[in-house]
Amino acid sequence: MQDKRLTEQRNPRSAGIDVLSVQEMVDLINSEDRTVADAVGRERKAIARAVELVVEAFGQGGRLVYIGAGTSGRLGILDAAEMPPTFGTDPELVQGVIAGGYDALVRAQEGAEDSPEGGAAALEALEVDPRDFVLGIATSGSTPFVHGGLNLARERGAKTGLLVCTHPSEESSRNLDVVIAPLVGPEVITGSTRMKAGTATKMVLNTITTSAMVLSGKVYGNLMVDLQVTCQKLQDRGERILMETIGLDRSEATALLEKAGGSVKVAIVMGERGVGAEDATRLLAEAGGLVSSVVGDLT
């Protein structure tokens, strides 16, 4: 009997993959991967709704919490981990929960995904409340750990959503605030959702958090002005942003960034408005963190 979940069905286009040449195999996988962006694009309205829920959560002091198992959980944690260095956020603002805990990041803990109680306990430990938005990631749509967590989040009054790569259940569509379902079709290797489903998941999560960070004032033009200058690469990027936006040379940019305590957006306001770091910080706070509201368009 064929499984109803798209992620578990056999792909007729890859039925003979084990007898293909290397080049034919690579071309087949690439041709399947090229369908993923279109599948994600068809979910644009649901993704936009998820962005709105994230911004709403941030605006009321809440968090974005991902919960998943296996590849889904790892991708949620990866996306969350990229927020502080890229956008200067508090590590608590975007968090990822994975079945089996952090050990599951490097070694599969497959049995952990079968426990709805485990998912509920994980979110209870985070003290999820009505200010938060919890997004479950379950490409097959049925992971008990994820649904246990979502049920607990709903009981606590949090907004909830689900990202799947199969047809969502009526219950999920009815009970959750948003369901995102990019239907990428059967995988090249049956059931291997680290492939197309994983790619779709990363695309969706990137879109959600990037859009939310832009709307939260973390980006000026298309420049990541809230990055944390924690390494040589980011120091260089911060200096180049100052050189481009307010016309400094390298040495001037280095000195200004140091005076701004490593904050690129504070440095931009200091340089453009001719104020000190304290006044620049105050002006940004009054503008909700939006650099453009303080200095206009310099990009």
Image: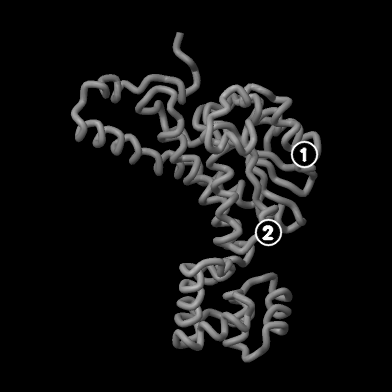
Q: Report whether residue 136 is seen.
A: no
Amino acid marked by disc 2: Asp
Percent position of residue 226, x then y: 59, 68
Circle on res. 47: none
Q: Earlier in the sequence, mark 1 or mark 2?
A: 2
Q: In this image, 108 relative to 172: left or right? A: left
Residue at point 54%, 36% (across, down): 72
The local crowd at label 1, few if under 14, some if 14 to 19, many if 20 or more residues have their Cα within 10 Å, is few
**Vertical comparison of 219 with 74: above or below:** below
Q: Position of residue 54 (x, y in %)?
A: 66, 51
Helix, strand or loop at label 1? It is: helix
Q: Marks 1 and 2: CB-CB under 8 Å?
A: no
Which residue: 50% across, 32% down?
165
Name the amino acid type tagged 1.
Ala
Quadrant of res 189:
top left
In the image: residue 6, left or right of residue 208: left
Please state if 287 lies on the left or on the right of 206 as rendered. Answer: right
Number of numbered discs overlaid on the protein picture: 2
Residue matched to label 2: 90
Furthest-bottom residue in view? 274
Task: Give me the C-alpha separation between circle 1 and circle 2.
Answer: 18 Å
Q: Identify the image quadrant of residue 93.
A: bottom right
Report the side of 276 relative to 201 (left or right). right
Asked if residue 143 is positioned above or below residue 58 in the image, the reply reads: above
Find numbered disc 2 in the image and state the secondary structure of the residue it sits on.
loop
Query: Residue at coordinates 62% horizontally, 67% vertically from top-left?
Result: 217
Label 2: few (<14), some or many (≥20) within 10 Å?
few
Instruction: Return the mark for residue 125.
Output: 1
> Depth check: 209 or 108 in front?
108
Percent from the top left, x then y, of residue 132? 73, 47
Asked if residue 88 is positioned above or below residue 136 in the image, the reply reads: below
Q: Position of residue 117 (x, y in %)?
A: 73, 25
